[in-house]
Amino acid sequence: MRDRKKMLLIVLYTLLLLPAFLRVDSVNAGPYLDSAHGDILYGVDRYTTDGVTPFPDYSKGNCAHCHEQHASIEGQTTTPSDYLLFYDNYVSQTDGVCFKCHDNTTTYAASAIVNRSYSFRAGGWTTDTLNDILEAFTDPPSISSHNLGNIQSFIATQSWGFTSNSNPCVACHNPHSAQGDPENSPNTAKTSASRGWPVSRPSLHSTDNLSWGLWGDGTGEKMSDYAGALIYQAPYRYNSTTTFEPDGSNTQNGSNMTDFPTFCLDCHSNSSIDFIDWSASTGDKHGKKAADGTGGSYLDIDTPYTNANGGRYVLSCTDCHEPHGSPNTRMIRREVNGSLLAGTVTTTSGTETGYLCRQCHTDDRDYSSSGSVNSWEYVHHCAPDYPYSQSSCSSCHGAGLAKVVCGGGGGGGGGGQPIDCNNCHFHGSDDSWAPASLRTGRGTF
Amino acid sequence: MTLNLNTIKFIDAGPKAFMSGYDTNISDTEETGLNKCSTISHSLLPLYLIPCLLFTLALFSIPSTAVSSVTGDCSNCHTMHYSQNGTQSSGWGGSGPYDALLTNDCVGCHSSTTAVTIINNTPIIYNTTSPTSILAGGNFYYAIADDSTGHNVSGIKAQDGTLGLTPPGGSAMSSQLTCAGEVGCHGDRSTGNNNIVGVTGAHHTDDSGGITGSTVGLSYRFLNGITGKEDADWEQDNINTSHNEYQGATNFSTVSTISYLCGQCHGNSGSGGFHNSLGVGSASPWLRHPTDIVLKSTGEYADYTTYSMVAPVARPDPDNVMNTATVTPGTDIVICISCHRSHASPYYKLLRWDFKGWPGNAATNGCNVCHTSKN
């Protein structure tokens, strides 16, 4: 009897021990299966229509839609590419493996892949006709876009694990994690229910998908986190004064918004490329640095921004810029803060940049019906906290300009021209362009 | 050729057949161990579990090994005149006489009309009914209905309708793939296009001294020149404490690896090859999935530490594996067999899992065994 008990104990012991030695392969859903590429319903789905290469009916989301394990399909050898991709990782600004599917055609993709502008997705401007990533990088219609070659070169020089072979798109997007934003509904603006998280910080790049996670989806990765004691005010959705970017909800404080400054500054804090300083101490006023004011008065700003919070706002890069490309220069959005820009910004020379500024700042037309769209006499010369008195006009304008909204009439006799916005207004600028006697020393961006 | 697909009843043969004496020894050891445990007093319960624990650990850490050649009566495999009472025995193949006075050919001996995959210690690699527990190499059962799930071996099915005589990554063969011989995987290819001649004497080779690869009989599974450690039950039990140990290397040129063998047909040279630096690359970014490459010890690969029967790895020294159930990133090696079965599998391209159906099938993706964070 005692032996039988011992035997039973040993058997039980062995049964308890066995699982420790036997591997049980289980199905684990991770970030890839939650991604746009890995989704079983709308994930990657290659179907070549070149008439030569038959492509097997892999499940949607399958690795093989992007990666050829042996560059051999049904006995036909295909041209192998880096990382086992079915096409070269990067060729040019408009050619590379990503563009083979993100081009709104069925040349490679089983169904045309539509991706919209940020103005469409977050801004809610759903009549924007731009509908794929390749188009966003193509001139025309875009006249500015992120330079993929420069990105590829830049990230390879950082200690982030990229190489000269890396795909520049991967600087911003982890292809094994990036989510649809919105998810599988490219023809509608995103909502709080449909929104996803498409970017990953390049400085956190890793071949370990768990280490190189999405950016914006977690605690501490929101604009509200970035703003801290300052204020992030979400811009209006298109044609609305009650709903806000990025998801059309009434959330306004950025708690539903990716901290894009931190994301973008991974690269743009480097002096070798378009340097941006968004810091409180030395940065731009659109960033964390406090706006200048006089006696608590600040330049007039449009709703939903208020002068009561003047000096405390911090903006997201995407409030003004498209991430991929734009028909405006400097990737300036076509829709900002609830409405379309009144004109195209083809150059930073001249005053076209003002079309962007007036989306949040008070131009003469906003101030007075007698003023003109994208004229800036009011802000510069008679608004509360105006920086320059209306005297010595020719010192800046070459000749006098007629006063229009600031008291009317008078002026220096006409013949003068508006000043190029770019003389004083660009990232990192101040008014040092102005004659020494008129300079305020203020930051002007 | 007419195949004899009758159940094999009397054959005690096959590559590295499991000795009956070895069975007995293991059994005796188990018995002894149990007896020792049973004589210890209850008052020493915690203490007497210690030797049991040690015994169990030892049992699981001993690499299983087939240690000798085929045994049994000659007539199990041979017939002097291919005649028994004026006809052929029911257990013989029907298209004899066969070379080497055998009673059947390769396929005939290693096939079954049942679902059983080991019969009288003979590994069955082709069942005509769905096999219950496939062996490490897979089972040609799956290739019958679908060319893309198995190698098209002569005597089992016709040549591949899509690939013809050209294996992907390689050059056209002179004739259809065979088990052994000039266009076969097993045996010596220099002996001509004959299955039996290709493996002559191999079944009788005593390999108790080790799998050295010096002869066909001393090669892993009679794959000429290949080394490794052979699991006694051909991985029928499919557990990671007892399995084949494959030979790997850290380059494409080591001729004793299982991947090199695959590359002999699938491209050990040429830009289209699957197992050479011209076709695959020599470092990341790879052009094709590398084999005979060390599983990296960094990033997501570092998490592959428990040996997976879904996506196994090779070892640099299969004869000296301390713990068969573990994987050591930075040391162990990715091979063709990490993803593919050698004979046939239920899945597209002989894969070890339903890759083609993933992720829609909600099943395990073997890719994730190594690429642990890409799920």
Image (cartoon, coloured by chain):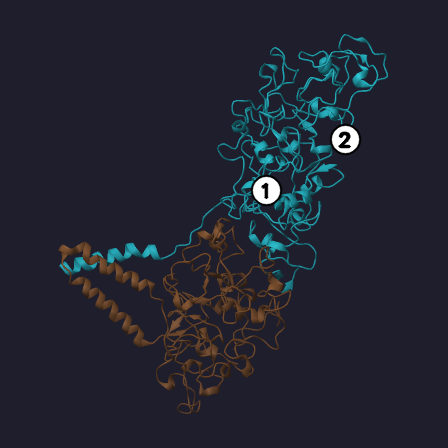
Chain colours: A cyan, B brown
Q: Pointers 2 and 1 in contact (CB under 8 A)?
A: no
**In the rendered structure, the residue with mark 1 lies on which chain?**
A
Residue A103 visible in the displayed image: no
Q: Position of residue A323 (x, y in %)?
A: 65, 36
Check disc 2 and report its element: helix, strand or loop: loop
The answer to whether residue B251 is seen in the rendering is yes
Do circles 2 and 1 both sit on a common chain?
yes
In front: label 2 or label 1: 2
Front one among B56 and B285:
B285
Amino acid residing under circle 1: His
For residue A347, the mark is 2
Q: Quadrant of residue A70?
A: bottom right
Q: Is residue B211 above or below residue A94?
A: below
Crowding around mark 1 (Cα neighbors within 10 Å: few <14, some 14 to 19, many 20+) is many
Quarter residue A129 falls in: top right
The reply, left or right, for residue A4 in relation to residue B12 is: left
For marks 2 and 1, give the CA distance: 29 Å
Which disc number belongs to residue A173?
1
> Measured from the top left, where is residue A170 in percent x and y?
60, 44
Residue A317 vertical placement versus B117 (above, below): above
Which subunit holds the residue at mark 2?
A: A
Q: Residue furthest front?
A: A436
**Type of the residue with mark 2:** Thr
Q: Of label 2 and label 1, which has the lower sequence position?
A: 1
Q: Position of residue A412 (x, y in %)?
A: 83, 12
Total numbered labels: 2
* Residue at the (35%, 82%) spot, across then down: B72
Q: Secondary structure at mark 1?
A: loop
Q: Which mark is residue A215?
A: none
Depth check, front residue: A408 or A67 = A408
* For residue A156, above or below residue A260: below
